Image: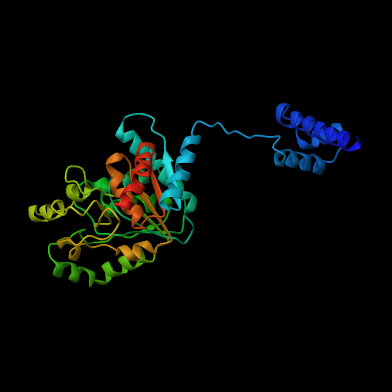
C-alpha cells in the first residue's frame, strides 16, 4: 500500500508540474518556488515525465514539411545539406529569386575571413549575388572557376565575381579567357599564360565553390545561349545522348560520370575531380527541368549543398532511387 501511495504521489506531483509548465507557461523557477522544490528537482521531474511517456511534443510550423523534405533528401542522396524553398506562386522569376536568397543566406553563414571563393556563371548564380546586401567587409578573394561566356552581362562569370567581391568587401580577380576555345591548341596556349594559370590555381584551392547545375538543352541552357559555339559544336552536344547535365562546362551522364565529347579538350575550367575536393561546394538549381541534372550532380558527388525549390526537391527525391538503379 505504501508503494502504491508513493507511485500515486509521484505521478500526481509530475502531473502538477506538467500542467504548470506547459499549460500555464510558468518557468521552472516559479514552479519550484510555489511547490517548495529546487529548480534542479523540477528539471528532473520534467525529464522523468518525458521518459515515462507523459509528454508528447508535436511541432506545427508553416514549413515543417520542408524541413522533413530536406532531411529526406539528405538521407536518400547523401548530400550534406539540402536547402529547400517553398513554392509560393507560379512565377519562375520569383521562384529563382527565392532560391537565390536561400543560397545567399547559406553561403554567408558559412563564409569566413581569409576564404577563397570560386564560382561559375549563369542565372542561378546571378540570383544569388543579387540577394547579397552590399554592407559586409570580409578579407576574402573571389575568383572564376571557369572562363567567361559572351552574352548577357549579368550572368558572365567575371561580372558576377566582381559584383560578389564588391558586395562582400573582398577582392575579385578576373579570368581573361573564354569558356570554350576554338581549338585545343588555343586552350593550351591560354593555360600557359601566368595570369590565367594563377587564377585557376586559386580556384583549385578554394574553400567554397558556388555553381549552377546546367541542363543540356539548347532552348534553355546557358551553355548554348552565352557560349560562342559553332553549329557543329552544338550538334556534337545535342547528339550526345549520354549527357544530361553540365557543371563548370563539364558534361556528365545521369550517374555523374564525365561524358566524352569533342569540347572536353577546349574548355577552360577547373577539373571535376579537383572541384570535388573543395571543402564546401554549393549547387544552385531551380525548377523541374533541372531534376535530371541535379540527380546527376548528386550521383557524381560533386555538390555538398543543394539549394532548390520544393517541387524540384520532391521530383528529385521520387526519381533518385530509380535513376540510381538504372
Residue drawn at (77%, 37%) of the image: 28
Q: Is residue 25 above or below residue 125?
A: above
Residue 194, horizontal then vertical, whole percent: 27, 72
Residue drawn at (32%, 45%) of the image: 124
The number of discs equals: 0
Residue 128, horizontal then vertical, whole percent: 37, 45
- The N terminus sits in image quarter: top right
Instruction: Looking at the picture, tell me which residue is in the foreground, 212 or 129.
Output: 212
Residue 272, horizontal then vertical, whole percent: 31, 62
Q: Is residue 258 above or below residue 105?
A: below
Observer able to see residue 234: yes
Q: Is residue 10 above or below residue 167?
A: above
The outermost residue toward the right is: 2
Observer able to see residue 162: no
Instruction: Looking at the picture, tell me which residue is in the foreground, 70 or 89.
Output: 70
Residue drawn at (28%, 47%) of the image: 292
Q: Quadrant of residue 16?
A: top right
Q: Quadrant of residue 34?
A: top right
- Is 183 placed left or right of 95 in the picture? left
The outermost residue toward the front is: 1
- Is 220 placed left or right of 104 in the picture? left
Amino acid at each position: 500500500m505504501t508503494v502504491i501511495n508513493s507511485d500515486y504521489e509521484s505521478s500526481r506531483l509530475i502531473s502538477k508540474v506538467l500542467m504548470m509548465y506547459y499549460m500555464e507557461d510558468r518557468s521552472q523557477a516559479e514552479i519550484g518556488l510555489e511547490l517548495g522544490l529546487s529548480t534542479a528537482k523540477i528539471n528532473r521531474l520534467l525529464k522523468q515525465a518525458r521518459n515515462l511517456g507523459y509528454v508528447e511534443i508535436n511541432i506545427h510550423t508553416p514549413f515543417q514539411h520542408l524541413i522533413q523534405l530536406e532531411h529526406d533528401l539528405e538521407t536518400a542522396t547523401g548530400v550534406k545539406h539540402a536547402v529547400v524553398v517553398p513554392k509560393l506562386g507560379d512565377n519562375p522569376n520569383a521562384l529563382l529569386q527565392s532560391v537565390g536568397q536561400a543560397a545567399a543566406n547559406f553561403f554567408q553563414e558559412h563564409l569566413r575571413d581569409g576564404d577563397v571563393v570560386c564560382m561559375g556563371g549563369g542565372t542561378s548564380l546571378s540570383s544569388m549575388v543579387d540577394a547579397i546586401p552590399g554592407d559586409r567587409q570580409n578579407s576574402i578573394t573571389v575568383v572564376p572557376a571557369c572562363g567567361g561566356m559572351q552574352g548577357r552581362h549579368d550572368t558572365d562569370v567575371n561580372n558576377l565575381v566582381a559584383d560578389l567581391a564588391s558586395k562582400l568587401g573582398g577582392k575579385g580577380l578576373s579570368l581573361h579567357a573564354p569558356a570554350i576555345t576554338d581549338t585545343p591548341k588555343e586552350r593550351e596556349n591560354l593555360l600557359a599564360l601566368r595570369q590565367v594559370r594563377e587564377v585557376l590555381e586559386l580556384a583549385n584551392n578554394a574553400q567554397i565553390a558556388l555553381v549552377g547545375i546546367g541542363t543540356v538543352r539548347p532552348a534553355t541552357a546557358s551553355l548554348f545561349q552565352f557560349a560562342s559555339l559553332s553549329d557543329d559544336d552544338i550538334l556534337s552536344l545535342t547528339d550526345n545522348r549520354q549527357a544530361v547535365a553540365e557543371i563548370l562546362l563539364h558534361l556528365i551522364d545521369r550517374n555523374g560520370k564525365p561524358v566524352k565529347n569533342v569540347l572536353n579538350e577546349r574548355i577552360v575550367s577547373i577539373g571535376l575531380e579537383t572541384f570535388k575536393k573543395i571543402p564546401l561546394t554549393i549547387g544552385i538549381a531551380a525548377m523541374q527541368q533541372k531534376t535530371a541534372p541535379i540527380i546527376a550532380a548528386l550521383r557524381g558527388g560533386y555538390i555538398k549543398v543543394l539549394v532548390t525549390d520544393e517541387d524540384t526537391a520532391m521530383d528529385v527525391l521520387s526519381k533518385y532511387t530509380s535513376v540510381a538503379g538504372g
